[in-house]
Image (cartoon, coloured by chain):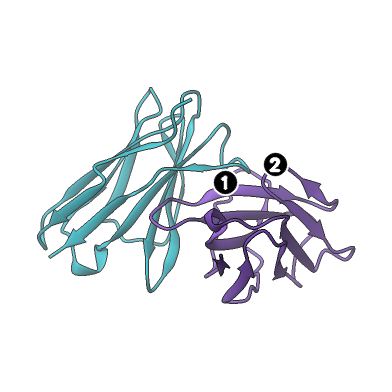
Amino acid sequence: KAGVTQTPRYLIKTRGQQVTLSCSPISGHRSVSWYQQTPGQGLQFLFEYFSETQRNKGNFPGRFSGRQFSNSRSEMNVSTLELGDSALYLCASSLVRQGPEAFFGQGTRLTVV
Amino acid sequence: DAKTTQPNSMESNEEEPVHLPCNHSTISGTDYIHWYRQLPSQGPEYVIHGLTSNVNNRMASLAIAEDRKSSTLILHRATLRDAAVYYCILRAHNYGQNFVFGPGTRLSVLP
């Protein structure tokens, strides 16, 4: 079956702009989590969505937001981009909420200039 | 979330077994031990998880100490494709617990 699909794979934005990233989970998976990966901080949890509701949120400012649609696809949005938002954004899906086996996408590489 | 300690890096020769250690002395009774790995330019990939007993799957084996304060991920025959960062993560299996990734162990496999 198809894996987790993240689009776009690469993105370059200017400071102050906003960006939307998309994640399509594995068919049948209802839980979607987002992570940010940077060389300095490593992999950090952003938020988790299940049944179109945000269930858990990491320690990130309100500029980071997301949503999940009825087909379980998820989007995350970052407003007023800062240079420090440059990172690899990873989406993970699992069959149940925060299941033991999470399937990660290849990520979206965001560069803020 | 309880913390884990892993070596920063390890090296192995191709086709030899690899034992990746993880210390988790503050593990609680409900914490499961998960292993993920991240190949270059890829997202993390599930490897294995367990609670108390040793576990085997097609990718690896997980050996858990009797007191559960440490565990070892065993790759039975390393290939070049196994070169990755390996993360040992503790997580309670109650809903709402996200994975907390540490720096992991960077495994190099030499031909």
* Residue furthest out toward the front: B111
Residue linked to disc 2: B58
Residue linked to disc 1: B96
Report whether mark 1 lies on the same chain as mark 2: yes
Classify mark 1: residues with Cα within 10 Å, few (<14), some (14-19) or many (20+): some
Quadrant for the C terminus of chain A, please: bottom left
Q: Chain of mark 2?
A: B
Q: Secondary structure at mark 1?
A: loop
Q: Which label belongs to residue B61? A: none
Percent x, y of residue A88:
33, 57
Of B79 and A75, nearer the camera is B79
- Side (left or right) of B90 relative to B69: left
Q: Colour of chain B?
A: purple
What type is the residue that disc 1 sits on?
Gly
Residue B95 sits above or below residue B105 on the image? above
Classify mark 2: residues with Cα within 10 Å, few (<14), some (14-19) or many (20+): few
Residue B109 sits above or below residue A76 on the image? below
Could you say which quadrant of the image residue B104 lies in?
bottom right
Percent x, y of residue A75:
30, 39
Percent x, y of residue A10:
22, 50
Which sits earlier in the primary sequence, circle 1 or circle 2?
Answer: 2
Residue drawn at x 58%, y 47% as measured from the top left: B46
Separation of disc 1 and disc 2 at Cα? 28 Å
Number of the front mark, 1 or 2: 2
Residue B102 sits above or below residue B61 on the image? below
Q: Colour of chain A?
A: cyan
Q: Chain of mark 1?
A: B
Residue drawn at x 27%, y 54% as measured from the top left: A109
Of B109 and B27, nearer the camera is B109
